[in-house]
């Protein structure tokens, strides 16, 4: 457990948490000390959830069956947690909270990555839409069914606030406590802000790695990205004859390092400028976690490169089109006949048919969605998604 004395006064504090929706006794005491603090309990509940295990078989960029070494939502979430904890420790923030937010941040993602989410949002456009951040919150607040006395995981406010990175105002108004900051235009804890940046550092860098490994992008192309080219030059001058795999790794690990150091340095300056006394000062201040202006520009050009050359690569787009078709047709099929839904979704379908169908589809893993598609459309053995 992180020593309380090391925490900054403006860090989130589990002993002063805004709390859970349902009151629960604190964890068992040993020698007067709780066994786990409230944020550690949140983290443990997330790890034991069904939605967390499903992340193993959900696409990040490449569909899960493309190869065993590409990132999945699960390994992505673990990388985000690793980065977020390191940054939180450097900034004297609460590591357990950043870890828990990181592990939960993608729980609401559909199968097939962004293609799946876009398709489901399109299907739901006349029924309130579909946002993956909001769905992650829905998973931990409602959809997990594990406890006798309540739906969901009954997580702390701070954890739920951290999951809800974005939210449309019309949805924020329905959410109560965690929706208020979108209406009042305030900010979340620094732990939530750090986790957002850890997410971005993780995916930009692991997408470079997976992109190179897949052969869809090349080191030669990446020379146009300053952040990559600078670190590549350092590695090549130190190790002139390095084989490709080690060259890639040595370059990417340096990229991550310069991004993290820049983020910690700039954020420390931003915090010092407003000299916050407590977490309320953080919530009322501008967004305080940031890269320097120079690194913001470099990071943006890396993102733009990935969008143009990887996410919009013809082969990835082809894969996305197939994924979108599967999601759309599954949605129409279930909406047309709710008897096809599993029992637990039939009950909620009586209250809101489209939302129950979206919840069911969003919870599917890539391979389960493909299996359901084959079964419902009598296409045994005929559907497989591939970027090749
Ligand atoms: Mg993420």
Image: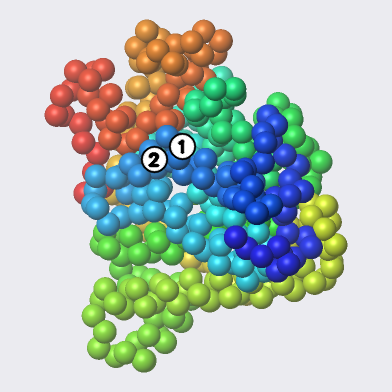
In front here: 287 or 121?
287
Q: Secondary structure at mark 2?
A: helix
Residue 387 in percent (x, y) is at 26, 47
Label 2, label 1: how many angstroms apart (C-alpha)? 7 Å
Q: Relative to 230, is 68 above or below?
A: above
Does residue 85 lie above or below 266 as drawn?
Answer: above
Q: In the picture, residue 253 is in which quadrant? A: bottom left
> In terms of image quadrants, where is residue 374?
top left
Q: Position of residue 144 (x, y in %)?
A: 50, 29
Residue at 16 percent across and 29 percent down: it is: 382
Q: Which mark is residue 49?
A: 1
Residue 321: quarter of image? top left
Q: How many marks?
A: 2
Query: What numbered label is drawn on residue 53?
Result: 2
Identity of the residue furthest to the front in this view: 31
- Which quadrant, please, contains the N terminus? bottom right
Checking the image for residue 286, the label placed there is none
Residue at the location (46% across, 44% down)? 47
Is residue 269 visible in the rendered image? The answer is: yes
**How does the figure colour the protein chain or chains?**
rainbow
Give the residue drawn at x 55%, y 54%: 99
Left or right, 34 with respect to 104, comes to right
Closest to the observer, 356 or 388: 356
Mark 2 nearby-residue class (10 Å; few <14, some 14–19, many ≥20) = some
Q: Residue at x 57, y 24 (%)?
A: 151
Residue 370 position within the rendered picture, expressed as x and y whole percent measured from the top left:
27, 30
- Labelled pair 2, 1 in contact (Cβ < 8 Å): yes
Q: Is residue 189 in view from this perspective? A: no
Residue 9 located left or right of residue 158: right
């Amino acid at each position: 457990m992180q020593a309380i004395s090391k925490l900054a006064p403006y860090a989130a504090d589990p002993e002063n948490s805004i709390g859970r929706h349902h009151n629960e006794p604190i964890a068992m005491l040993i020698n007067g000390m709780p066994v786990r603090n409230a944020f550690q309990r949140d983290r443990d509940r997330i790890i034991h959830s069904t939605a967390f295990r499903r992340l193993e078989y959900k696409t990040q960029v490449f569909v899960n069956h493309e190869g065993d070494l590409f990132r999945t939502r699960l390994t992505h979430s673990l990388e985000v947690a690793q980065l977020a904890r390191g940054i939180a420790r450097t900034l004297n923030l609460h590591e357990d909270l950043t870890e828990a937010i990181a592990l939960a941040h993608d729980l609401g993602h559909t199968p097939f990555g962004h293609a799946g989410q876009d398709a489901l949002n399109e299907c739901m456009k006349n029924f309130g839409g579909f946002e993956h951040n909001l769905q992650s919150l829905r998973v931990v607040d409602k959809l997990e069914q594990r406890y006798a006395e309540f739906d969901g995981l009954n997580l702390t406010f701070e954890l739920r606030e951290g999951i809800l990175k974005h939210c449309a105002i019309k949805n924020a108004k329905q959410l109560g406590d965690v929706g208020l900051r979108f209406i009042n235009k305030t900010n979340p804890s620094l732990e939530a802000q750090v986790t957002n940046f850890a997410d971005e550092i993780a995916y930009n860098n692991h997408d470079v790695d997976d992109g190179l490994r897949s052969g869809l992008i090349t080191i030669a192309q990446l020379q146009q990205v300053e952040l990559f080219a600078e670190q590549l030059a350092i590695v090549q001058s130190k190790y002139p004859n390095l084989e490709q795999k080690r060259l890639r790794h040595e370059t990417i690990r340096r990229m991550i390092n310069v991004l993290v150091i820049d983020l910690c340095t700039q954020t420390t300056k931003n915090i010092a400028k407003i000299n916050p006394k407590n977490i309320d000062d953080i919530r009322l201040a501008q967004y305080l976690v940031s890269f320097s202006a120079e690194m913001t520009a470099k990071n943006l050009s890396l993102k733009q490169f990935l969008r143009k050359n990887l996410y919009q690569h013809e082969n990835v787009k082809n894969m996305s089109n197939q994924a979108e078709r599967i999601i759309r047709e599954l949605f129409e099929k279930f909406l047309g006949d709710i008897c096809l839904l599993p029992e637990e979704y039939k009950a909620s379908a009586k209250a809101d048919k489209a939302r129950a169908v979206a919840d069911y589809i969003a919870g599917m893993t890539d391979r389960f969605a493909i299996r359901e598609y084959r079964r419902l459309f009598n296409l045994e053995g005929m559907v497989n998604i591939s970027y090749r």
